[in-house]
Amino acid sequence: MARLPFAQRSDIPENLQYVWDRNTTNDELPNIFRTMANNPVVWRAYLRLGNGLWSACGLDVPTRELVILRTAILQHSAYEWHQHVRIGRQAGLSDARIVGLHHWRAGDLYSASERAILAYVDALAASDHPPADVHASLAAHFPPATIVGVNLLVGYYVMTAKFLGAMEVETEGPFAGWQLGA
């Protein structure tokens, strides 16, 4: 059970209710947003940053989702994993490639550029200073603007995982499972 109450639309100042409306699908607002809406100004800023990172991080949607899903694994964030499995599937990722992220080094499911970015995500999650060879590998595949985007995207989802864990936000439906039903 979440540590904070879920906000209601009526709890939000009228000038910010549009944030609720834009993020509601079929009259449902995801639990993460219902929790964040306890501070609607910060919630709006969080969404603006996230939208900017999604659209301008320099990655195509499937690669962006690989980065987010790997970050979810490394942060043990069931909520992020659960949400981004669906988004990754919509982006064309197969379940084999999604589940393969748990042990991505062991298989041949990922291209050289994907392997470089996954190694960088792992290094960034382990330290705030990835080794020079890992950075050089990433830089061989991606321009500086994308490297900035990847760093900030990973940081954003680490922050999100910390929020979700601290607030004990539960998935909206049954958890997809770390192995997707295997």
Image (spheres, grey):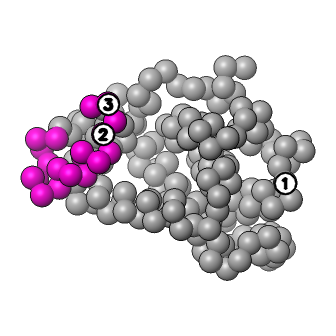
Q: Position of residue 51 (x, y in %)?
A: 43, 60
Dot label at residue 111: 1
Q: Quadrant of residue 171?
A: top left
Residue named by callout 3: 26
Label 2 crowd (10 A; few <14 / some 14-19 / many >=20)? few
Residue 18 vertical placement versus 93 (above, below): below
- Residue denoted by label 2: 24
The residue at 69%/27% (across/down) is 179
Q: Are marks 1 and 2 in contact (CB under 8 Å)?
A: no
Mark 3–mark 1 distance (CA, rounded to whole Å): 37 Å
Q: Position of residue 148 (x, y in %)?
A: 60, 74
**Residue 95 placed where, x, y %?**
71, 32
Dot 1 or dot 2: first in sequence order is: 2
Residue 180 falls in which quadrant of the image? top right
Callouts 3 and 2 close, C-beta under 8 Å: yes
- At numbered mark 1, what does the secondary structure look like: helix, strand or loop? loop
Query: Which residues fall within the magenta stretch?
Result: 9-27
Residue placed most toward the observer, 90 or 36? 90
Structural crowding at the residue carrying mark 3, measured as other residues with C-alpha within 10 Å and reported as few (<14), some (14–19) or many (≥20)? few
Q: Amino acid at mark 3?
A: Asn
As displayed, is residue 154 above or below residue 35? Answer: below
| Camera sees residue 127 | yes
Answer left or right for 12 relative to 49. Answer: left
Asked if one can make out residue 119 in the rendered structure from this viewpoint, the answer is no
